[in-house]
C-alpha cells in the first residue's frame, strides 16, 4: 500500500514538472527567438534550419531601432501611464474592497454581483463612450477651451476603476483574522488607520499581486492609447513599436525584434528585481497570530 502511494506521488510530481517544463518552453522559446532575431541580419532570420544563436551578432539593430522612432519619448509616456494608472487602480481597488468588506453597506452582495457583471463587459464596448466623453463632454462640463484628447489624463482615467482589482482584494480582505481588526478598533483606530496599519500589511500578498497585474496591463495597453493619441509626443511604446513596420511589407525584422525587446525586457527586469519583495509579501501573509 505504501509503495503504491509513493508511486502515485512520484507520477503526480513527474506530471506536474512535465507540465511546468512544457509551459516554460511555450513561453521561453518565442522570447528566446525574439532576442536571438534581434541580433541577426535579414538573411539570417530566414535561414533554414534556423540558427538559434547568431554567429555574428548584429548589435546595430538596437541602435537602428532606437534611432528609427523616438523611443526615449515613448518610454517616458509609458512610464507615466503605467505608474499613475497602476496607482489609480490600487487606490480605487483597495478603498472599494475595504468598504465592501468591513462597512455595513446596504445591498453589499448586490453591489458585488454588479462588480462581477462588469468583468464580463469587454473593454472595447467602452471605447466610443470614453472617446466622446474626453472629446466633447469634458470640455463642455468644465468649460475648457480644448478637449482632453491626446492627453495623459485621457489615457489614465478610463482605467482607474477596476472591477477585477476590487473583487480580488475584497476576497483577500474577507480572509483576514477579525480578532486583529477588532483589537485595532478597540485601540481607537479609525478606518484609514486600520486600513494602512493593519489591513494592508496583512493583505500584502494580494495587493502586490494585483499591482503587478495592473502594471503589466498598463504597460502593454495598445488599443485605447492608439485611439486617444494623435501625436508621437504622447504615444506609448506599444503604439510606437508599430512605426518600425514598413507599409509595403519590406520589414527589417531584426530591427523590429530589437524594438520589441525595448518593450518586453523592462517588464522582465522589473519582475526579477521585485521577485524578492513578492516572496516576502507571500510569506508575510502565510501565518497568523
Image (cartoon, rainbow, N blue to C red):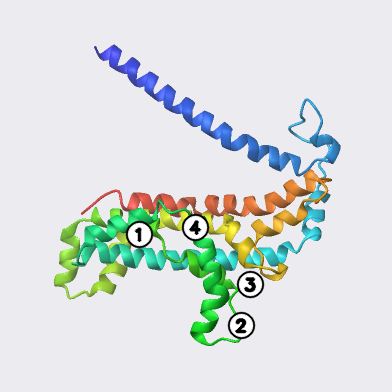
Residue drawn where x is 58% and y is 53% of the image = 267
Residue at disc 3, secondary structure: loop
Mark positioned earlier in the residue sequence (3 or 4): 4
Please say if 143 is above or below 256. Answer: below
Identify the image quadrant of residue 54.
top right
Q: In this image, 169 relative to 175: left or right?
A: right
Residue 84 appears in view: no
Q: Would you name the residue on which mark 1 appears?
A: 166
Mark positioned earlier in the residue sequence (3 or 1): 3
Q: Classify mark 3: residues with Cα within 10 Å, few (<14), some (14-19) or many (20+).
A: many
Please say if 289 is above or below 200. Answer: above
Image x and y of residue 23, in percent: 52, 33
Q: In this image, 16 relative to 32: left or right?
A: left
Q: Classify mark 4: residues with Cα within 10 Å, few (<14), some (14-19) or many (20+).
A: few
In this rendered view, identify the residue nearer to me: 271 or 100: 100
Separation of disc 4 and disc 1 at Cα?
A: 20 Å
Mark positioned earlier in the residue sequence (4 or 1): 4
Separation of disc 3 and disc 4 at Cα?
A: 20 Å
Amino acid at each position: 500500500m505504501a509503495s503504491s502511494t509513493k508511486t502515485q506521488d512520484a507520477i503526480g510530481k513527474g506530471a506536474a514538472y512535465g507540465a511546468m517544463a512544457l509551459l516554460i518552453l511555450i513561453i521561453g522559446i518565442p522570447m528566446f527567438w525574439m532576442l536571438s532575431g534581434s541580433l541577426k541580419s535579414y538573411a539570417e532570420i530566414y535561414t533554414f534550419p534556423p540558427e538559434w544563436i547568431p554567429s555574428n551578432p548584429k548589435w546595430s539593430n538596437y541602435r537602428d531601432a532606437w534611432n528609427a522612432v523616438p523611443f526615449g519619448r515613448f518610454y517616458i509616456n509609458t512610464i507615466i501611464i503605467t505608474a499613475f494608472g497602476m496607482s489609480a487602480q490600487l487606490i480605487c481597488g483597495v478603498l472599494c474592497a475595504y468598504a465592501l468588506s468591513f462597512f455595513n453597506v446596504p445591498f453589499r452582495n448586490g453591489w458585488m454581483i454588479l462588480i462581477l457583471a462588469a468583468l464580463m463587459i469587454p473593454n472595447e464596448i467602452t471605447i466610443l463612450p470614453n472617446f466622446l466623453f474626453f472629446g466633447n463632454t469634458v470640455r463642455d462640463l468644465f468649460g475648457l477651451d480644448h478637449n482632453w484628447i491626446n492627453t495623459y489624463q485621457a489615457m489614465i482615467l478610463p482605467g482607474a476603476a477596476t472591477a477585477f482589482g476590487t473583487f480580488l482584494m475584497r476576497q483577500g480582505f474577507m480572509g483576514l483574522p477579525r480578532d486583529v481588526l477588532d483589537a485595532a478598533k478597540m485601540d481607537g483606530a479609525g478606518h484609514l488607520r486600520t486600513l494602512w496599519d493593519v489591513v494592508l500589511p496583512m493583505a500584502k500578498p494580494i495587493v502586490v499581486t494585483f499591482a503587478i497585474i495592473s502594471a503589466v496591463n498598463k504597460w502593454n495597453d495598445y488599443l485605447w492609447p492608439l485611439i486617444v493619441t494623435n501625436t508621437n509626443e504622447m504615444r506609448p511604446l506599444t503604439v510606437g513599436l508599430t512605426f518600425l513596420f514598413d507599409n509595403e511589407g519590406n520589414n527589417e525584422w531584426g530591427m523590429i525584434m530589437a524594438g520589441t525587446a525595448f518593450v518586453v525586457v523592462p517588464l522582465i527586469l522589473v519582475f526579477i528585481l521585485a521577485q524578492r519583495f513578492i516572496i516576502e509579501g507571500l510569506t508575510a501573509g502565510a501565518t497568523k497570530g
